Image (cartoon, rainbow, N blue to C red):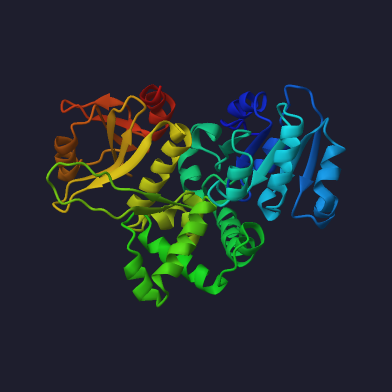
Amino acid sequence: MIYRIAHDQIIDDIQFFPALAIIGPRQVGKTTLARNLRIPSGKPLLYLDLEWEEDRAKLSDAGAYLLQHEDKCVIIDEVQIMPSLFQILRSLVDRKREPARFILLGSASPELLRNSAESLAGRIAYHELCPFSLLEIWEENILRRHWFCGGFPNAFLAPSEQVAGKWLQQFYTTYIERDITHVIGRDVNSAKMLRFVRMLAHIHGNILNLSELSNSMNIATQTLSSYLDLLEGSFLIRRLEPFYVNVGKRLTKSPKFYFRDSGFYHAVARFRDMEDLYASPAIGASWEGYVIEEIFRIAGNHCEYYFYRTQNGAEIDLLLITPRSEKVCIEIKAANAPKISRGFHHSVADLQPEHQYVITPESERYQRSDGIVMIGLYHFLKYDLPLLIS
């Protein structure tokens, strides 16, 4: 089994918190991770999957059933399907407050799991499990496969790029046609949502303009906004907010849009293999989104994340604000010997960051005379980023 970076922190938290939630997109390995945890207290595990009618039936009188298993660590999968459970879990935790009572697995974010946030406040720790990160699966010559196929286990471990693409195509259509209603509990027009997701592939890595999308699709802006919230709450997309600073310049104020998993994006955009991607003008946006997501997966909540753009052409792909409030300006380039844009230099002059990087697929690390560090992605994630967030 591939070692997951989240594992050690999950083990630490489960020794203190009565409840622990592992959340993340479907098919990312939450169940596999939870069922293979070695609970420090030695409690046996009891697994319930709320997508199975038999397990839902066991919880028809949830309080009575769970009281019979107070000695166990109970794993409840797809917990958002039964929101009424959260009040009962709170009562059971308060009745016998000890670590590792419940592990809750869900395919919806805390914002969509408001019942848990309210009912179990102070009793639960949240962990997001992402698709495989580059550091989790690293070996020589793996980067381009991971970039193209993404980190969903079934896609990354597929025997070929074509098989990975077929799985991802099936995954996203199934998610939209079935899972939004069944798992997230929202009724949406699946045909409109599928069309919207395919339209989003054209703006990956670009400024999100809902009004333009609304006009081109003839769908109300409010409807598209709710679709975005569902996709974001299901861990499939990310909106990167612009950085506002009083520098006397006209700044872009709309977010940029990205599909979080690069393989998911490539499937939606219908790239058949890496050759298709190399031949496309979208390769730069693809690499940009991939790098930003890999940084998120390692740095997590330790940093604040923005992009910076003025209407005069100054631009930074990613601006990190570290725990020490240092600014890190990052230019993301798909070529190993890139030309650095004039807009990046102008942005650095505006923001006066403590650190400047250009991240490429495989450049050797070196520092230029102007202070910019050229570096390959793996070495940035493995060595430089931990120092920035420590």
Residue 176 vertical position relative to residue 379 in the rendered view, above or below: below
Which residue, as the protein is rendered here, is positioned at the far right?
68
Which residue is depicted at the point 65% across and 35% down?
20
Which residue is painted at 54% across and 73% down in the image? 191
Residue at the image position 30 percent from the left and 28 percent from the top: 325
Measured from the top left, where is residue 301 in percent x and y? 45, 34
Q: In the displayed structure, would residue 228 be above or below residue 335? A: below
Q: 84 or 224: which is nearer to us?
A: 84
- Quadrant location of the C terminus in the rendered image: top left
The residue sitting at 42% across, 61% down in the picture is 201
Residue 11 screen position, x and y as percent: 65, 26
Which percent across, then down, holds residue 156?
Answer: 57, 45
Quarter of the rendering containing residue 328: top left
Q: Is residue 212 left or right of residue 65?
A: left
Quadrant in which residue 381 is drawn: top left
Quadrant of the drawing holding the N terminus: top right
The answer to which of 112 and 331 lies nearer the viewer is: 112
Number of marks drawn: 0
> Closer to the camera, 233 or 133?
233
How far across and down, in percent of the image, does residue 229 sit?
48, 57
Residue lying furthest bottom in this view? 218
Residue 102 visible in the snapshot = yes
Asked whether the viewer can see residue 332, the reply is: no
- Image-based side of 44 in relation to 163, left or right: right
